[in-house]
Image (cartoon, helix red, strand yellow):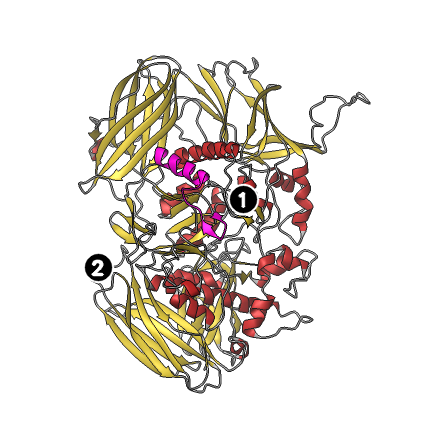
Amino acid sequence: MASDAGIADGVNLSERDKRAPAPVAGVALGADCGMAPEAALELCLNGADWRLTGWYPNQWQPRLSMELGVSILPAVAELSASVPGSVQTDLLAAGRMANPFVGLDSLHGEWVTQREWIYSKTVQIPDGWERDRCELVFEGLDYAGTVFWNGRKAADFEGTFLPVVVDVTGSLAPDGANLLQVMFRRPPELDGQVGYSSRIRHLKARFGYGWDWIPRMVAVGIWRSVRLRTYEGAAVRDFYPEAVPAEEAGQGAVSFRTELEVMRPGAYDCLYALEDAEGRTIWQARRQETLRAGPARLALAAIVSGIGLWWPAGMGAQPLYRARVELRDCEGRIMDAAARTIGFRRIEWRANPGSPADALPYTAVVNGIPVFLRGVNWVPVSPYYGAVTEADYRTQLDPLADMNVNVLRVWGGGLIETPAFYDYCDRRGLLVWQELLQSSSALDNCPPDDPQLLEMLSAVTAAAVREKRAHPSLLIWCGGNELMWEGFRPVDERHANIAMLAGLIRELDPGRRFLPASASGPTFCADAKDFGRGVHHDVHGPWLYAGSPGHYAFFNGDDALFRSETGTPGASRPGLLRGLRGTCDVWPPTADNPYWTHRGSWWVPWDAVSESFGPWRRDEDELDEFARCSRFLQKESLRYSAEATRRRAPQASGFLVWMGNEPFPNNANTSVLEYDGMPKPAYYALKKAFAPLHVSARYDQARYLSGEKFRADIYLHAEYDEALHPAAGAVVRATVLTLEGATIAEREYAAFPLPSGSAELGAIALSVPELAERVFLLRLEAAAADGRTLAETTYVYATTDSSFAWEALRSLPEAGAVTVMPAPAGDREVLVYNESTVAAVELWLTAEDDDGSLVRFTDNGLTLLPGECRTVGWSGGSGRLSSLRAEGFNARTEYRGDRS
């Protein structure tokens, strides 16, 4: 029978009583299977010992050719395979497929989806291992096919994100050698970026069918873990320990909810426990349950003392706990067990101040403190997402966490992200906005309402919610990306699809926010002619730099409550562009160059860069300078967009960059990280704009004429941060300088105590003098009372009557005395020193370690005044630099000394 919920008569353990739990008897489960080691008897079937064959459709079925009576050979002979993974990564490892990341060679891999594929593995099972029930569990099969067990059909499957459980009870081979085969049919044909959302009938990651940031690369294969489980007596089918802070400080409330399938009715002991990060049991309880055969639900509520609050990044620590349940029979043997990682935090949502009455609440309040959501849109790490490792996740997520983001929006055309992704976000305090596998399609953006599709979407969503809802990082469930009725009006719960999802979330995860779509509200994009009308709630766009003064005027007038997508493209670094060109020409970056149209066709930068920096020669390779200009535009655009939105807090409550990462090495794209995780210059501007303490300037344009008035309004941004004392203050200095470092104007402001949020301190204004260099600078610095620099921002402005706003940056006087070197006594630090008579503008540091790997700097894209020296840290690699150089608009230097 099901148990009624009640406050548990549990025990909070003293320090001397805390000890790690005894291991559960049975087969140890590898961590790569993503399940708790205390689960019932279980065999992890992951590994590199699988075999793979490829077939023309249906030719694997007959044993012999009916014409010749001979065996039909596979179209792709047997090769080694890894699970989790993909057919494509196995073919790459075997040398059977061209590298799709080089040149145009992804075109040569499109044949893979025209074959059927069979994975095979011999599963050795010890004698006597099977108990009352035995099941094969596939966490993710991409996309449709059939499972065979010992030569017999065991189950059909369909759906990338729908777990498949196959009952193989009583069918184990007598000799212990069991043949498992998984056949994949050709994947369905879906619309990529352009098509009809309402006609979608399959839930597979759509980005692989071609988007503006990836060519067609459709994955096939076993993309998540596989295991064989056996049960005795009863099985835990779902375990949800919901954790929130209790009313009394230092206490947490846990609501344990367990769903069972009982095979043997009778009396069972249920043991509940909570462990800290060191594996010490800090609370435990035992209850006896009398269970009938069939499904059963158990509930237990507990108050636990001595817990710490989980905070988003920048607001505090992220203490994690492991909640466990064990089911034992009357003899004390463990029948089954389950565990989840939890954290104690409370998230609420408030209406933005001054927002329209019909607007949804967009201000997140964590543990009672409003949070400005600053983050990026996250897309899959690779088109072959099954082969992504924890190290691959760290390569992309580490720099984003260091960029001061506190939220990742998992975009709807990609994945329900994996346990490894969520575990990382739990540890680093990154909130997750998870979208539910739906996206716009340009020709028709309305989500499907087909009953069969809704049935599958419901099943997939239920599985995702059950797997993810215990994670403290999970912030929002969202119906999908840019789902709209005609007229670009975002959908809401009046649509059957969205109403179904909203109801499912209310049932399975009632404490979590559900958004119908992103964008949401009356309109999809913000339009300057509608500023002040209250129609811009959560909006998307723009995705281009609008020039001067257009870009600055737009964001100065913006009234959006929330920006969940705003972006600008920037080129990848020249070394990457040249290294992956294959047989293609890297220059010119134009719409008639197939190398550029294949690798980010929407973002070919020739026109945009030419409009801002002037003409380029098609017949002479100017890639280094051109890429520098493209990357500068992305940095300038995103920095001002993010700062302008933050200046409007709390009326505006968040800014998410489109996009953080990319799964394919585009030549130009809106991502702030390149394919290999290396930051673009925009990354560092956003790192400052997202910092808990930041100084920014509001101005009307970036290009001025001599004699024209320049005015910058100075803002100080201070958010809750464990490193900032609430009573601390800052002195903010604003200095306008010539390129030679001469002061044109200076103002100083005192901010004691620090403001809560964003505060306007004052303005600095002047008549722009005539400058030979056609460039001037604005340096903002915030310093503590003891003189420590807390924040610094440098802006570059042009003084020109040219129609090309930033053309002056291409002809700056050379800063010929810039030095870069490893810091003499510094561990993983370099010194950058400008001994020139002019400022070095946008210095970009590049270094490799002894293994030839690029390292990532803590700051980059530096503008150094004459006589200025900067110490910059770096991470990654072996710890020894083999090369170090700096290049900017007017400087180029390399370290040539002792590199030991």
Which quadrant does the N terminus fall into? top left
Q: How far across and how far down the image is residue 146, in percent? A: 59, 26
**Crowding at mark 1 (Cα within 10 Å: few <14, some 14-19, many 20+):** many
Nearest-to-viewer mark from 2 and 1: 1
**Crowding at mark 2 (Cα within 10 Å: few <14, some 14-19, many 20+):** some
Where does label 1 land, which residue? 197
Q: How far across and how far down the image is residue 596, in percent? A: 63, 59
Do the numbered discs 2 and 1 sit on residues whose CB atoms are within 8 Å? no
Is residue 309 rendered to the left or right of residue 34?
left
Residue 505 magenta-highlighted:
yes
Q: Residue at x 19, y 40 (%)?
A: 247
Is residue 730 rendered to the left or right of residue 700?
left
Of 821 and 126, the residue lying toward us: 126
Is residue 81 rendered to the left or right of residue 651?
right
Q: Is residue 448 visible?
A: yes
Q: How far across and how far down the image is residue 680, in percent? A: 49, 61
Label drawn at residue 138: none
Number of numbered markers: 2
> What type is the residue that disc 2 sits on?
Pro
In whole angstroms, how far apart are the C-alphas of marks 2 and 1?
A: 49 Å
Q: Residue at x 64, y 34 (%)?
A: 186
> What type is the residue that disc 1 sits on?
Ser
Where does label 2 land, which residue? 726
Please tell me whether mark 2 sits on a helix, a strand or a loop: loop
Reply above or below: 44 against 209.
above
Please tell me whether mark 1 sits on a helix, a strand or a loop: helix
Mark 2 vs mark 1: which is more N-terminal?
A: 1
Bounds of the magenta segment: 484-508
Q: Residue pushed farthest right?
A: 68
Residue 867 magenta-highlighted:
no
Of 828 and 67, the residue lying toward us: 67
When asked about the image quadrant of residue 657, the answer is bottom left
